[in-house]
Structures are given as C-alpha cells and as structure tokens.
Image (cartoon, rainbow, N blue to C red):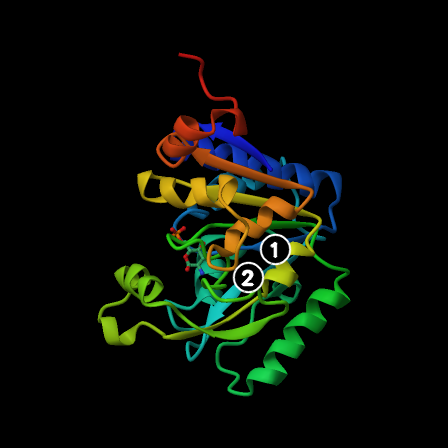
Amino acid sequence: MNIIYAEDYADLSRKAANQIAAQVILKPESVLGLATGSSPLGTYRRLIELYDAGDVDFAACRAVNLDEYCGLSEQNDQSYAYFMRENLFRHINIRPENTHIPDGMNRDMEAECRRYEEIIASLGGIDLQLLGIGHNGHIGFNEPDSSFSRYTHCVELAKQTVDANSRFFAKREDVPTHAYTMGIGTIMAANKILLIASGEGKAHILLEMAAGPICPQVPASILQLHSDVTVIADKDALGLLMEKAPHLVTGAPVV
Ligand code: GLP
C-alpha cells in the first residue's frame, strides 16, 4: 500500500485526478470504478478541468460505480446515479451507455446483483477503482461484518452510515436503509485501487486500515493484501498514521 501525503483537500484532489487522468491517457478504453460521497467531489472537478483543457479524453472510457441506494430512482437527486451525472458524467465526453451503476429500483435483488457482476465481467474487469472510506472502515457500502463479502450484494446500512449520510437528506426517515454494493471480492479484483480520504474525522480509520489487523470488522483493512493500492490523504486524515507509523507515509514534509 502506497500512502501519499497531500497538504489539503485541493492538493489531494489534484493528485487523485492526475492518477485517474494518467490511467485514461495510457489506456483510453479503461474501465474506471467510480465512487460517490464528498471525498471524490474535488477529484471529479479537477478531472473536468483536465478534460476542458484537452488533457484527457473519455470517449472510449467505461465506468462502473461502486454502489447505489435501494429504492431511489436515477431521477432522485440523492441517488448515486444522479450524483455521478451531475458531478462528472454530463461535464465530460464519456458516453452515457458506457456508464453503469446498480439499479436501485430493481426489487429482485438476486437478479440485480447477478446483472451487475455480469456487466463488470463483460467489460473485462476494472482497471482502476476509486474508493472513499466510511468512518467505520466501509468501502463501497461493505459494512463491518463477520466475513468479507465476495460479490455485488444488497446490504443493510449500519446506523453510523445512515447517520453520516442523513446530512444529504431533508428528513432522517428519507435516508435509505439498504443499498446495492460491489462486494469486497469485486473491489479486490480491480487491477489498481486508489483510495482518497480527507479530514481529521478519517484519521482513526486510516490508521486501522493501513496498520491494524486485517479483519472484516474493518472492511478496508483487506486492501493491505492488494498488490497495487495507492492511498492519497490530506495531512488531517494522515495525522495518526504519521504519528504512529510514519514509515508508511510517502511525501510528508520533513520537520
Ligand atoms: C458512502 C459511500 C462510500 C463513501 C462513504 C464516505 O457511504 N457509499 O462509497 O466512501 O460514503 O463518504 P465521504 O467521502 O462523504 O466521507
């Protein structure tokens, strides 16, 4: 795991966007695994700037998103489909038919999970998977559990996750309690993984993820076993790691 220091959110976003742009420049038909949440917003803004400047072309690129809330249609402004359209897809030249996300309105869970895994397989797998991280160590919506999930599945969201995500909804009772998510196995099968984290609130979980035991109670800890993981985090998120395991962090200023 290569953990790269960023000064702040803007620096993190620029570094993460550079990695994604490099992936697309080197392999225009890349399959990008994409994420939602507040962490990737700056990265997407920076990617749009790179696209506007003519530095990166998404015409041949394919995208598969990590997860989607159950019960929200793509027109719902809290759905992840809506988030991706508004914050990235409609600003770049990726073809809509090349963007994929679980269908939150499909009540046939088994069929939906199978359909999504088949899409990823038909694309030849994921070249670069972008991840945020939940405060409890979840990636995608893989919540702490007694075992690591393999494939795309439907999850009941942890109370902490519902609480954290309620900031985006008018009423707490509007926050979905279930979601479709790629499994840990789906994520681990990606060729490269790029995880981004910002702010002091993520410091504890970054330490557990990178330097703690690998266990399904901290889902992101399994990334220690992947051969090509880059973590880009700002100094606030890296606070505890720099204090307890500074040898794991690349690029921190020498004081
Ligand atoms: C949600 C998403 C995750 C994301 C997490 C953290 O639960 N399903 O993919 O990583 O939130 O979000 P944020 O980046 O807003 O802290």
Compare residues 46 and 203 and report the one nearer the observer.
Answer: 203
Give the structural element (helix, strand or loop) at label 1.
strand
Residue hosting label 1: 33
Task: Classify the position of the N terminus by image quarter.
Answer: top right
Camera sees residue 91: no
Residue hosting label 2: 66
C-alpha span from label 1 to label 2: 7 Å
* Residue displayed at 60% across by 44% down: 224
Assess mark 2: CB under 8 A from ligand 1?
Answer: yes
In percent of width and height, residue 37 lies at: 41, 54
Asked whether, in this view, residue 55 is left or right of residue 216, the answer is right
Compare residues 78 and 7 and report the one nearer the observer.
Answer: 7
* Residue displayed at 44% across by 13% down: 254
Image quarter for residue 236?
top left
Give the structural element (helix, strand or loop) at label 2.
loop
Residue, far bottom: 108
Asked whether, in this view, residue 193 is left or right of residue 70, the answer is right
Query: Residue 188 — which label?
Result: none
Q: Quick check: which quadrant has ligand 1? A: bottom left
